[in-house]
Amino acid sequence: MCGIAGFWRSRRRPDDPLATLNRMGQSLAHRGPDDSGAFFDPESGIGLSFRRLSIIDLSREGHQPMFSASGRYAIIFNGEVYNYEELRAELGARSWRGHSDTEVMLEAIEHWGLEAALGRFVGMFAFALWDCRERRLFLVRDRLGIKPIYYGWVDGDFVFASELKAIWQHPDFQGEIDRDVLAEYIRHGYVPSPHCIYRGLRKLRPGTMVELHSPAGDPVERVFWSAQEVAMKGLQSPFQGPDSEAVEQLQARLMDAVRLRMIADVPLGAFLSGGIDSSAVVALMQAQSSRPIKTYTIGFREQRYNEAAHAKKVAARLGTDHTELYVTPHDALAVIPSLSSLYDEPFADSSQIPTFLVSRLARGSVTVALSGDGGDELFGGYARYERAGLVWKTMGWMPRRLRGIAARGIASLSGSAFDRGVRLARPLLPKRLHLRNPKDTGRRVADYLAKGTKEDLYLRVISGWDAPEDLVPDSREPQNVLNSISALSGAGDFYECMMFTDLVNYLPDDVLTKVDRASMAVSLEVRVPVIDHRVVEFAWQLPLHYKIRNGVSKWALRQVLDKYVPAGLIERPKMGFGIPLGEWLRGPLREWAEELLSPAALEQHGLLRAGPIRQSWQEHVAGDKSWEFALWTVLAFQDWYSKAPRSAVISAPQALRAK
C-alpha cells in the first residue's frame, strides 16, 4: 500500500517543483514509510510523488515512480494487483527487472492498452499514469473504490493525490468549503463521490478513469467497470441452478479471492469480529494456511456492543492465533483529536475509532490484514433493509394523508412513551428486529410514515439529518445518492435497490474510506476479498432468496461458513463495529462535545444554524431522545473545521443572521 500525489503545472512558478513534490509525499509518509520518490519534467510540467509501503518485491526494483521498459509510461500506484504472477506468465519472456506487480502493470498496459489491461487486473488500485510520448495523464480508480484518489485544480494547476493533505501542500491552495457538499455531508455523515468538501476538487468515482491532454483541459471521464451494469445484467440473467451449485460456486470464488489476497512478502493477518463476513474470510484463510492465521478483534465492556467474546470462540474453533483488546472511553478520547487529520474531509462514522484501534493492534505484528467488508451490501446483511422493507410493506398501500396523520401521532409521543411501547412489543418481534435505541426509533418511524415513495423512505433511513438544507443556509444538496436508489427501478426488488445504493455510495465513501484511512494511519494494508469484482458479479447473479431467506440475511454466505464454523457460534443479532456513542456523549465525551456544540462554536463560521443542533443536543443530554448519530456528524465537522486548511473566515449569509 502506498501514497501517490502530483501535479501538472499550467505555467512556471517561482517555487522549486521538486521541493513541493517532496512536501506532498512527506504528508503521505504514513501510507508509505519504507521508500519515497519524486519526478518532475520541466518541459511538460508534470510532477509525480510517491511513498511506498513495501508488500511485494521489497527490493529497490519496486521503487516508484516506475517507468516501463520502453520508457513510454511512468506510473505511481497505490494498491495491489493480486493476479500479477498470472499476468506476468501471460506476457511471457521480457526484460523483467524485478518481481513487483507495478512492473507487470506497466508492461500489461504497454502490451494490451490501458482499458484492456484494466479488464485483466484483479485487485485494488488508484494510480496515475503519464504517457511520456503522447503527453497524456490518466488517473484510474479500482472497480469498487477501495483505494482513494482526489483531483482538481489549484490556481490553474491540475493536482491529484491519495489524500487531501498532499494537495494542501500546493503553495497556492486555498480551501473554499462547498456549502452544497456540506449539506450532503450533514445528511450522510460522509461526502459521497464525486464530490469533495472543497470547491474545485473531486473524488474519482469507483471503476472510472480520467484522461487529461493538458492541465487546463477538461478531463475525459470513462467508466471501465459499472456496478449498475453488473447489477442489471445479473438481475436480467439470474443464476438458475440448484442451491448446492450456487453455494459451491460462491465458495470457489471466495476461496480464490482470499488465496490471492494472502500473497505477500510480509507478515499477514485478519480482522475478526465473530460475525458472518469476517468469520468466513478467516475460515477460508485458515483452510489455505499451514500455520495459524493471526486474528485481531476489539471489545467493549458495554455488553450490547461487545463482539469480542464471540470472536474469541470463532478463533478457537478455527485454530487462529488470536489477539483481543478491550476499548474504554479513555481510549476513544485519546483517538478523537487525531480523527480530523486522518480523514481530511469531515467524516462521521463513529466506528472509525475501533477501526483505528484494531488496525494499530494488528500493525504490532503484521503489515497486511484481511477484512470482511462488503458482505452486508452484497448479501443483504444490514438490519435497515428488513426494517425499511417492513415499513414500506406495512404503509405503502396507505394514502399519504393517512400516513401523515399516523406520523404526527407517533411524533407527539415522548421518547419515554415510545420506549415503553417498544419494550412491551419486544417479545413479539424476532431478534433481528430488536432495536438498540427505541427512543430514537420513534422519531424515525414518524419520519418514515411521512414519506411518499420507497426511494424517499430509504433516503430517510440512511440519513442522519432529514433536511440538511435547513441546517446549512444557502445550500442546495446534490441528489446523486437519491438517484442511485432509483437506478434499478423496474428491474430490482426494493431490497436490491437498497443494496445497490449502499454498494455504490455507503461502501466506497463510508466503509472503505474508514478502513483505508484508519489502517493507513498506522501503515497497515487492509485487503477486502469479499468485494473481489468476480465475487460481486456472481453475487448480483444470485436471486434475492440466496441472500435473504425466511427472514435470514446472507443465506448463501452462511452456507459457505457452515462448513467451517457451527451456526450456533454465529447466530445472534448483528452488532456492527460501533461504539456506545450515545452513552459516551452523555458521559465521558460530554465536555468535549459541549465545547464544539456551544452557540459560539456553531455560529463562528456561518456555515450551520445553531438552533436545531442545540435543541437536539439538549434533548440527547436529557435522555428523552437519542440523537447521537446526527450529533456526531456535526461534532466531526466542527472538529475538522477547527483544524483543516481553508480560505478566509466565511461571513454568515443573510439567511443565518436573520435567525
Image: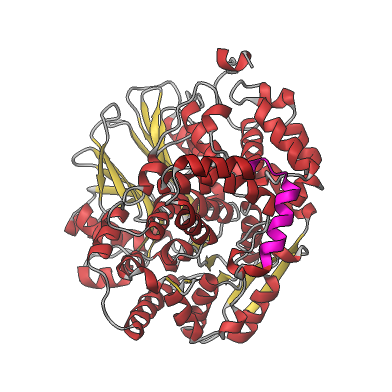
Please name whichever residue, 127 or 635, is drawn nearer the observer in this view of the structure: 635
Please name whichever residue, 283 or 626, is drawn nearer the observer in this view of the structure: 626
Q: On the image, which quarter does residue 422 sit in?
A: bottom right
292 is higher (above) or lower (below) than 653 = below
Instruction: Tell me where the magenta segment starts and ends, as one range.
Output: 411-426
245 is higher (above) or lower (below) than 590 = below
Residue 49: percent from left, percent from top: 43, 43
Q: Is residue 447 left or right of residue 230?
A: right
Q: Is residue 613 left or right of residue 62?
A: right
Residue 508: percent from left, percent from top: 44, 52
Magenta stretch holds residue 297: no
149 is higher (above) or lower (below) than 302 = above
Residue 313: percent from left, percent from top: 66, 81
Residue visible at 57% across and 56% down? 519
Magenta stretch holds residue 413: yes
421 is higher (above) or lower (below) than 414 = below
Residue visible at 41% across and 34% down? 478
Residue visible at 26% across and 55% down? 229
Q: Name the magenta segment's main secondary structure.
A: helix
Please name whichever residue, 397 or 353, is drawn nearer the observer in this view of the structure: 397
Q: Is residue 545 visible?
A: yes
Q: Is residue 191 visible?
A: no
Residue 582: percent from left, percent from top: 72, 49
